[in-house]
């Protein structure tokens, strides 16, 4: 289990509990729980209620689809993330549906939907590791994703596994204490002081 976080001020227990492991159990995630993840994401706020996020996913029990979608991970992430029972990619629609104009907030909104999904997963005792280490062009090609969508990030989701199954370099990271910058480096009150 991950060492405790050094929380400066009280937060929701779900936020305190959330972390990003790389060791996942091979236990499949129940369909009802997968649906709950995407339902949570569906209720994220967005500019003009455009809901520009899209998700594409595959589960380990559908090996052809899973192997296809796993090609969207970079090689370093494939060595551990491709063991998770659920792989998800987050996309952002670049234009508004109502007028076809560019949506400058699409990535922000997709990030909010991913955060809602992440907190829902944590609440259900699922673990999620989000990844920037993806191959968007590969995924775009293998899934024939149109140019109106940016491929933003990947996620490996599952039940917590045994860190002993990871390669040495990843096992060390699994047991490292989580850190965050202090408020003084992130928040400026009344004036720009950062």
Image: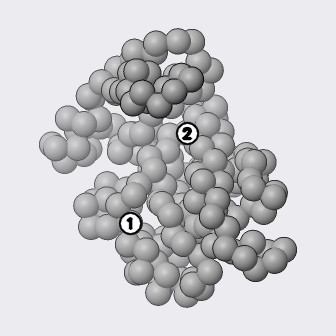
Residue in the foreground of this view, choosing between 17 and 63: 17
| Residue 120, above or below 3 | below
Q: Is residue 68 left or right of residue 48?
A: left
The residue that appears at 44% across and 46% down in the rendered structure is: 129
Residue 130: x and y in percent read 45, 50
Which quarter shows the N terminus?
top left
| Residue 83, above or below 52 | above
Say which residue label 1 marks: 134
Color scheme of the displayed model: one colour
The residue that appears at 31% across and 59% down in the rendered structure is: 77
- Of mark 1 and mark 2, the one earlier in the sequence is 2
Q: CA distance from mark 1 to mark 2?
A: 22 Å
Mark 1 surroundings within 10 Å by alpha-carbon count, few (fewer than 14), some (14 through 19), many (20 or more): many
Mark 2 surroundings within 10 Å by alpha-carbon count, few (fewer than 14), some (14 through 19), many (20 or more): some
Is residue 133 visible in the rendered image? The answer is: yes
Residue 5: x and y in percent read 40, 19
Query: Which disc is residue 126 wearing?
Result: 2
Residue in the foreground of this view, choosing between 153 and 175: 153
Q: Secondary structure at mark 1?
A: loop
């Amino acid at each position: 289990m991950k060492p405790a976080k050094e929380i400066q001020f009280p937060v929701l227990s779900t936020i305190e509990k959330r972390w990003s492991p790389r060791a996942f159990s091979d236990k499949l995630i129940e369909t009802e729980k997968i649906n709950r993840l995407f339902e949570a994401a569906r209720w994220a706020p967005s500019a003009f209620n455009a809901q520009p996020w899209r998700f594409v996913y595959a589960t380990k029990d559908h090996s052809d689809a899973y192997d296809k979608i796993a090609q969207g991970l970079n090689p370093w992430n494939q060595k551990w993330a491709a063991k998770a029972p659920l792989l998800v990619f987050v996309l952002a629609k670049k234009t508004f549906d109502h007028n076809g104009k560019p949506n400058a907030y699409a990535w922000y909104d997709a990030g909010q939907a991913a955060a809602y999904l992440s907190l829902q997963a944590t609440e259900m005792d699922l673990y999620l590791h989000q990844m920037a280490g993806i191959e968007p062009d590969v995924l775009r090609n293998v899934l024939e994703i149109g140019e109106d969508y940016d491929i933003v990030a990947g996620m490996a989701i599952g039940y917590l596994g045994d860190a002993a199954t990871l390669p040495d370099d990843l096992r060390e990271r699994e047991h490292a204490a989580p850190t965050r910058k202090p408020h003084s480096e992130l928040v400026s009150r009344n004036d720009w002081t950062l």
